[in-house]
Each structure stands twice: as structure tokens, then as C-alpha cells.
Image (cartoon, coloured by chain):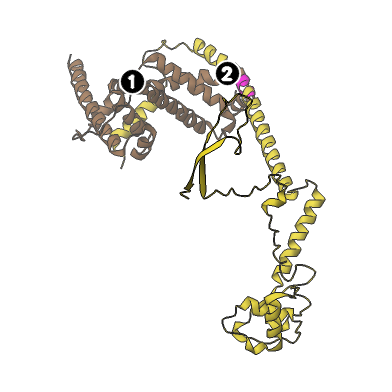
Chain colours: A brown, B yellow
């Protein structure tokens, strides 16, 4: 079935088209939600809420190719996750001193698989992880992050700096681990 | 902030992920069932919301209509309530406003005496002063009030009039059919005496006290009974004392 046709059917309220779209993108959307919400059940709940809002507001969506569908869906999921985190009141972010960043070794980064990077991101504390996700993965500016999380720009910057520093430390530790594994 | 290369690598790697790190954990079927149930319930809520919205809108329209109707009727018919009478009242008000706009201040000599109606005094001091002023208008004292000069002048029927200069009272030429030229004189209320209100109480003359008082001691040869009447002539006087009143 064509993606545009699926969207049109979803706008009419067809359950088959809705299920088709859900099966196509559910796992990827759950990956996004898990990047923000570590708990699996909560992440699934946020994903379902995101899909629910997506179907409810699909009449506003103008299909302009596959590239227009995924960003819109992703944006809805990210917003749902941020709303969930705000409800849980997990943000106790305060402006901290920016740490001196260790320059990330591109060779190390290139050598690590996407799954391992994903797991390393999940290891970050909630505040660091959220700011890192929004800035690095979603490409938002510090001003946008500050508006979304109701924090100051300085807090956003310091949280990102800490997150990067922590990730680099973990990368170096993993690199030693991989080096040891390879030497064996 | 310029994008660093490690960020770009990280983003590309994360976006390339399409499956969970631990495959087989996520079961899509129960998740879809849950979502489908919620989606089926959603239109009912939407329907209810539509009802609430329409009811609220209808209420607002009714209240606004009532408010506007009340306001317009109050404006049109302040006293009687009928539209025609209200329009007549408005026209009358407009005419009065136009008459006020036409008012022009003119000197005394231009006012016809017939317009201004003031009673000419016929008896008493006022009549005498009036006659004197009429005979010799230039003899009006400077201390005379402007009002009295004006009254004498106008009541004399002097159509030509005298120009009193700065002392003359400026008058307003009012159309005779619209408003009276001069306010009617204040009606003097009759003085009511106490006796005129039909009080039946009779006036008694004040008692006049005697200036002298006398005491008489009498001697009787008989024992007085209950039936015995003592008078001034009965018995024998022993002695009589006259006392002068203190008052």
C-alpha cells in the first residue's frame, strides 16, 4: 500500500490503515521514547499516547513524501516524552559549572556500533540525557531546549557539557574494554 | 554553536537504528489493541464535546440577545414603553436642543415689552417707586440692583427703552412659543393663625391675685353639725387681720 494512500485512509478513520502505520513505525518510535524515558513501560505508554495524538491530529498533516511523515511523528513522540517527564517532575536541573570537555576521538566513535552508542546514552542521568538528546540527536538550539524544559539557557549548556564529558569518559572506558577484547 | 563532527556521527548512528537493541521484547499486538480501544472511544468524547460547545454557544447567544433587547427597549421608551412615544420624546428633545442653540444674547432695548410679562405693582411702596422711576428714569440710584432696573424698564411698556450701559441686564431673546419669558412670581403662602385651625379650647383670662388677704376668727354659741353652713355673716367675729400679699 502506498504511504500517501495509507495517510488518506487514516484520515478517514480506517482501522486497517492505522494498524499498518503503527506496525511500520512502532518500534522506531519506541526507540525514540526509550532514549528519553528509561523505564520500558513508561516509554511504551508515551509511545501509545504519541500515536493516539498522531491519529487524532492527522487531518492537519499534509503528506509531502515519506520524509515529511517521520519527522512529524518523531516530533509528536518527543513532545509526549517531555510531557511525561515534566509530569513525573524528574527535572531538577540546576546550572552547573561547565566542565572542560575531552575532545571526542572520532576513530573511537566510528568504531563503536550504533547500538552501543544508544546504550551509552541510556546510561546517562535523566537531565543530561534529555538535553543531550534534544541538542545532539534532535538538533534543537539551547534556546529551544530552555523553552521546552522550562530551564535557563545556561542550565541547558551546562547539562550538555556534563553529558558530553560523561559520555566521553564512558567511550574511553569502552574503548579500553574493546581493545582488551580485541587483544585476546 | 557550530556542529562538531562527533555530534554528527552520533546522530547518524542513532538515526540509523530501526530496531531495539534486544530484539523480540516489544510485542506490537497488545500495544495495538490498547491503542485501538482508545481510538474507538475517542469519537464519543468528541461528540460530547461538540454538544457542550454548542450548548455553551447557544447560551451565550441567548444571553447576549436578551441583553441587547433590554438595552434597546430602555433607550427607545424610557417612560411609556411604546416605540412611537419614545420616538416622539426623542424628537421633542431634539427640537428643544435646537431652540437652545438658537438663543442669542441681545441688549435690553431690542426686547419687546409684550414678550416679558411682569406684574406692575399698583399699591404700596413698590407702586410709588415705580411711578417715580417711570417719570424720571435718569434718577435711578447707582446702588439699585440690575434686576430691579430691568423690571421697572420692562414693566413700563417702554418699547424704545433706555440704554443703561454697563448696568443693564443682558437678556436672552427667547421664542415666545417655546419658553416663558420670565419665571412666574413666587406665590406667597397665607399665614395661618392658631385660631383658624378650629381649636375649640376657650381662652381663660389670667387669674388676678388679691393683694390683701384677711383672716377672720369667729365665735359660735352652738355646736356645729354636719348640716351647719358657715358663712361670713354667721357667728360673731372675734377679730379680723388683714395681711398684705407678698406679691
Label 1: element kind = helix
Front one among A146 and B179: B179
Expressed as whole percent of the image width and height from the top left, the position of residue B170 reads 65, 78
Expressed as whole percent of the image width and height from the top left, the position of residue B208 reads 57, 49
User: Is residue B119 shown to the viewer in this render?
Assistant: yes
**Label 1 to label 2: alpha-carbon separation:** 33 Å
Q: Is residue B43 magenta?
A: yes
Which disc, if any, is residue B39? 2
Q: Quadrant of the C terminus of chain A?
A: top left
Q: Residue furthest front?
A: B221
The residue at which mark 1 appears reads as A115
Left/right of residue A121 with respect to residue B144 in the rendered view: left
- Seen at 59% across and 27% down, the residue is A7
Q: Is residue A37 magenta?
A: no
Q: Specify the segment rendered in magenta.
A: B42-47
Of all chains, the one bearing label 2 is: B
User: Is residue B172 shown to the viewer in this render?
Assistant: no
Label 2: element kind = helix
Of all chains, the one bearing label 1 is: A
Considering only vertical position in the picture, is B73 above or below A82?
Answer: below
Q: Main secondary structure of the magenta part?
A: helix
Amino acid at each position: 500500500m502506498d504511504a500517501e494512500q495509507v495517510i488518506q485512509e487514516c484520515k478517514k478513520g480506517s482501522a486497517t490503515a492505522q494498524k499498518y502505520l503503527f506496525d511500520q513505525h512502532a518500534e522506531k518510535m519506541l526507540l525514540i521514547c526509550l532514549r528519553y524515558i528509561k523505564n520500558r513501560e513508561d516509554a511504551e505508554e508515551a509511545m501509545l499516547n504519541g500515536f493516539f495524538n498522531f491519529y487524532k491530529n492527522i487531518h492537519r498533516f499534509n503528506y509531502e513524501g515519506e520524509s515529511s511523515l517521520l519527522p512529524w511523528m518523531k516530533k509528536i513522540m518527543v513532545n509526549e516524552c517531555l510531557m511525561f517527564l515534566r509530569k513525573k517532575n524528574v527535572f531538577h536541573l540546576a546550572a552547573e559549572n561547565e566542565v572542560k570537555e575531552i575532545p571526542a576521538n572520532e576513530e573511537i566513535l566510528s568504531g563503536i556500533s550504533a547500538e552501543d552508542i544508544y546504550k551509552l546514552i541510556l546510561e546517562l542521568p535523566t537531565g543530561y540525557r534529555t538535553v543531550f538528546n534534544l541538542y545532539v540527536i534532535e538538533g534543537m538550539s539551547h534556546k529551544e531546549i530552555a523553552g521546552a524544559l522550562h530551564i535557563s539557557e545556561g542550565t541547558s549548556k551546562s547539562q550538555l557539557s556534563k553529558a558530553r564529558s560523561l559520555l566521553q569518559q564512558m567511550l574511553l572506558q569502552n574503548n579500553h574494554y574493546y581493545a582488551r577484547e580485541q587483544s585476546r | 554553536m557550530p556542529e562538531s563532527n562527533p555530534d554528527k556521527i552520533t546522530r547518524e548512528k542513532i538515526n540509523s537504528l530501526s530496531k531495539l537493541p534486544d530484539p523480540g521484547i516489544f510485542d506490537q499486538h497488545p500495544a495495538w489493541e490498547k491503542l485501538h480501544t482508545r481510538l474507538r472511544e475517542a469519537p464519543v468524547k468528541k461528540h460530547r464535546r461538540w454538544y457542550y460547545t454548542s450548548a455553551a454557544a447557544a447560551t451565550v447567544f441567548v444571553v447576549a440577545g436578551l441583553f441587547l433587547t433590554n438595552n434597546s427597549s430602555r433607550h427607545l421608551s424610557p417612560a411609556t414603553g411604546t416605540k412611537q412615544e419614545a420616538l416622539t420624546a426623542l424628537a421633542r428633545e431634539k427640537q428643544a436642543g435646537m431652540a437652545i442653540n438658537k438663543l442669542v444674547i441681545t441688549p435690553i432695548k431690542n426686547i419687546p415689552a409684550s414678550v416679558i410679562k411682569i406684574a406692575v405693582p399698583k399699591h404700596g411702596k413698590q407702586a410709588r417707586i415705580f411711578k417715580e422711576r417711570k417719570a424720571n428714569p435718569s434718577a435711578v440710584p447707582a446702588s439699585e440692583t440690575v434686576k430691579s432696573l430691568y423690571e421697572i424698564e420692562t414693566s413700563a411698556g417702554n418699547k424704545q427703552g433706555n440704554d443703561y450701559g454697563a448696568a443693564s441686564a443682558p437678556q436672552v431673546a427667547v421664542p415666545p412659543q417655546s419658553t416663558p419669558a420670565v419665571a412666574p412670581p413666587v406665590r406667597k403662602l397665607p399665614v395661618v393663625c392658631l385660631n383658624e385651625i378650629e381649636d375649640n379650647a376657650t381662652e381663660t383670662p389670667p387669674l388676678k391675685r388679691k393683694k390683701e388677704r384677711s383672716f377672720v376668727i369667729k365665735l359660735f354659741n352652738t355646736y356645729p353639725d354636719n348640716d351647719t353652713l358657715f358663712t361670713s355673716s354667721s357667728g360673731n367675729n372675734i377679730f379680723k387681720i388683714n395681711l398684705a400679699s407678698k406679691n
